[in-house]
Amino acid sequence: MDSFTKALKANPTYARAYYCRMEVLKMIREYQLAIRDLTAVIHMRPDEPLSYLKKGHLHLLLSEYSHAEECIRIASTMSGTQGILSIRDAAVAAFLGNKDLAVSILKKELRSHPYPYTHLLLGKLYQKEGNHTEASEAFHAALTALTIPRYGEGVNKPIFRSECHTCCGHSLLMLGEESKALTIFAKAIKCNPKNAQAYYYQSLCKKKLCGAQPALHDINKSLKLDPSKFEVFLSCACMYDELGQPHKAIFNCTKAIHLQPKSARTHLYRGCIRMKMGLLTEALEDLDEAVALCNNSTTIYYNRALCHQKMRHFKEAELDYDLAVRRAKEVPLQIFINRGLLYLEIENYDDALKDFNAAVEISSINASLFQAIGICHQRLCNLEESVSAYSEAISLSPTFWEAHIGRGNVHFEQMTVQGMQESKRNYSRVLMMDPFNLPARLNLAYILQMEGKLRQAWEHLSLLLLIYPTDHGILESRAVVSLQAGYLQGSLKDVNDAIKISKTAKVLTNRGVIHEYLDDKMNAAKDFQEAISLDPDYHIAHFNLGNLYFHHRQFTQASKCYSKVLDLSPDDDSALVNIAICKVIEGDTEGALVDLNNA
């Protein structure tokens, strides 16, 4: 470049020096300076179409499409004696979007001059049209023409063969003929071991045939030969993500972003990977950037909605789902499903039901959707509709145990003898499919407990404890059943084991009740007081402590406890009755009458 600059100082009107310096500037990616030199050439030689084409290409590299189009249009008007060759005419026509004209020009040229490069250009035009069968034939014709001395002279045969094989393999890859394509790419690499594009396409072939792991060597080789390929970095990120190596996937996404900072797709993909890793704040930053770069993409808004939903930003998630729906020509099934799940989480059952019904219209064979509809109807107390939805889910998938349990729960909520029997049938069907199913056996034990079949309930809970010995909920449930059956020592042992696993106000209160039955009033009082200190808003502990004071005729303390119960649970009629009795004993009959009327 220094030599060309010195030449221009000696002769400022030396067009060739400007042209050569432009080529050097283009190699080092100083495109603006290259355009300046090329503009000088055009001023000196305004009738040379190649200069306009070169300038248009430089504007294209800078994403200045309007300037590029203008340069190409000017070049396209320069035909005849001043004009461009037919191949150049075809290139201009292709750039301007008239691909049929470009193909026609090249076919006409091939009838009289079947040069290898013309076949190659025709094949690339077919590729852009998506006509990969014709493209593959054109690349084979280019290789055949190369063997004819008259037309193959002056061509760098190994490099040209390698390019033809690469293009042909790409067309075969797009046609789904991966095995043939892999053989072609091997030939391309053999002709030119530095063909980065061939390594890249070969990696895509291997990924489809053998998975991501065998493809990594080729794609990394491609990046080593040419680290300027944005698409290769992005594909490499996909492979690492598929192999469960998210940190390397993010690294490759970052490299791709450095090459194309305004690529919404790359920010979206990096955001999705970070979201899977649980890096929600960083993921949201990427997704925000993707939205800023492309604000009309359904996919971007959908993924940002998922991120907000995971961060429990429910209003923002709902807004993004709405934006995704508005921008979609046909709303994808997954948007309705996930927005419905969001509405379920925020207890907006009406809107959740609408979304799940819309999803069913798209996919009417998805049993999980009918289960979700059943849940919505159940929450809205539409019990008959809920049973129908669960039944539809079961008819689609008879082994869908969650639907059986859901239907059993709805029958249980009906609180009828027939409903209880239906509940037991549903839970029993689940246990026939999976004897170790925790929800089914636990719910069946609760129903048996309500029916007074304490022995059977105890057996079911004991069986569960053999499978889940550290589940404090099961231990607590068996303790209650043992207490009801009069097996006080067994009940105390279970509740003590539950406290060792997880000390809660509820389980401490239950132990206090057991101590009362064992006539151990002191330990009962300690348990109730400890439960209150652990959770001051647990009204059942206050109620039981009040009962203990009442039993010991400490009516003032008992009244305070019952008053606290009413503060926490104003509709507790038992507390109203007990405080009324305390007031009668203390002589406050008018206050007692008010409380009894309220009860």
Image (cartoon, grey):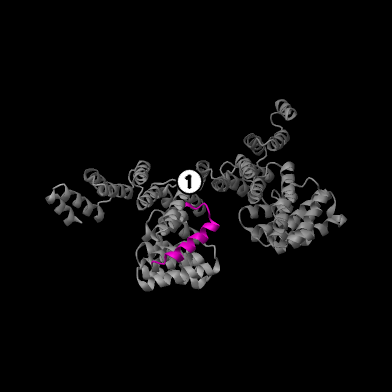
**In the figure, is residue 211 to the left or right of 434?**
right
Residue 7 versus residue 185: which sits nearer the camera?
A: 185
Q: Secondary structure at mark 1?
A: helix
Name the amino acid, label 1: Lys
Residue 303: percent from left, percent from top:
51, 51
**In the figure, is residue 286 to the left or right of 513?**
right
Q: Residue at x 80, y 50 (%)?
A: 189
Residue 366 visible in the snapshot? no
Q: Is residue 363 above or below residue 583?
A: below
Residue 79: percent from left, percent from top:
67, 51
Say if the magenta span includes residue 255: no
Residue 369 versus residue 489: which sits nearer the camera?
A: 489
The magenta-colored residue range is 452-472
- Which residue ends up furthest to the right in the rendered image? 149
Say if the magenta span includes residue 468: yes
Q: Is residue 317 above or below residue 421?
A: above
Q: Quadrant of the C terminus?
A: bottom left
Residue 542: percent from left, percent from top:
30, 47
**In the figure, is residue 21 to the left or right of 558?**
right
Residue 468 versus residue 176: which sits nearer the camera?
A: 468
* Most frequent secondary structure within the magenta stretch: helix
Residue 236 visible in the snapshot? yes
Total count of labels: 1
Q: Is residue 220 above or below residue 138?
A: above
Crowding around mark 1 (Cα neighbors within 10 Å: few <14, some 14 to 19, many 20+) is: few
Q: Which residue is mark 1?
A: 500
Residue 266: percent from left, percent from top:
58, 46
